[in-house]
Image (cartoon, rainbow, N blue to C red):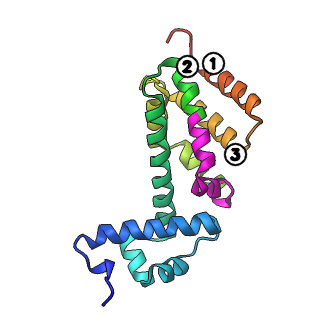
Amino acid sequence: MAHDWLLDEHRSDRARDRLIAAAAVLIRRNGVDNFDINELARGAHCSRATVYRHVGGKKAIIDAVLAASSIRITTTVAARTARLQGAERSVAAITVALQEVRRDRVIQQLLASQRFFSTAPEALASPAITEAAITLLGLAERDIAQAQWIIRGFMALATWPMPPEQESAAVDALVGGVMRSDR
């Protein structure tokens, strides 16, 4: 008899992880706008009810897939900038994050989706995103406005890329404009 992953101990966690991984494959292939729960259920050999029970509806699934990509990207940025400080750290964090965003097919599909522009204001207002930016950029906790400004600049660069030399100058100008000399 074939092994049934839904019947394992810790099946809820395993089911959630497998369904999110399967959803990521579908999003990479078909895009965010074309993500379909029926296709996910068929591919995972389970019912729609199982999908909803373990990972929720379409928005929750897409959010979970995006969160997994975001965690990978922020972990990479943190590791590659850990020893840097000040403006050097901020420039490196933005540069590495842009490279990672461009390598991540899920994030690229989000940026190409209709969903991106409708959810961008929500993302820009997210305290979690602001806190992550403050940490990754090496800013002080009180630097909320600076972090939010850099997030907006980052989103513009991620959405509308520039030639590498122009982008490097734009990142330097963005960080220089936000970081004060008294830091």
Say which quarter of the image contains residue 95.
Answer: top right
Hey, what amino acid is under mark 2? Ala
Q: CA distance from mark 2 to mark 3?
A: 23 Å
Q: Are marks 2 and 1 in contact (CB under 8 Å)?
A: yes
Sooner in the amino-acid sequence: mark 2 or mark 1: 2
- Say whether residue 41 is left or right of residue 26: left
Q: Are marks 1 and 3 in contact (CB under 8 Å)?
A: no
Q: Nearer the viewer, mark 2 or mark 1?
A: 2
Q: CA distance from mark 2 to mark 1?
A: 7 Å
Say which quarter of the image contains residue 50.
Answer: bottom left
According to the picture, the residue beneath numbered tag 2 turns out to be: 87
Hey, what amino acid is under mark 1? Gly
Q: Position of residue 7 (x, y in %)?
A: 27, 80
Q: Position of residue 156 (x, y in %)?
A: 68, 40
According to the picture, the residue beneath numbered tag 3 turns out to be: 159
Residue 122 visible in the current orientation: yes
Per the rendered image, the range of residues in magenta is: 96-116
Circle 3 sits in a helix, a strand or a loop, which is it? Answer: helix
Q: Residues within 10 Å of mark 1 (few under 14, many from 20)?
A: some
Q: Position of residue 135 (x, y in %)?
A: 43, 31
Q: Residue at x 40, y 69 (%)?
A: 18
Q: Is residue 150 above or below residue 158?
A: above
According to the picture, the residue beneath numbered tag 1 turns out to be: 176
Residue 127 visible in the current orientation: no
Q: Residue at x 64, y 71 (%)?
A: 34
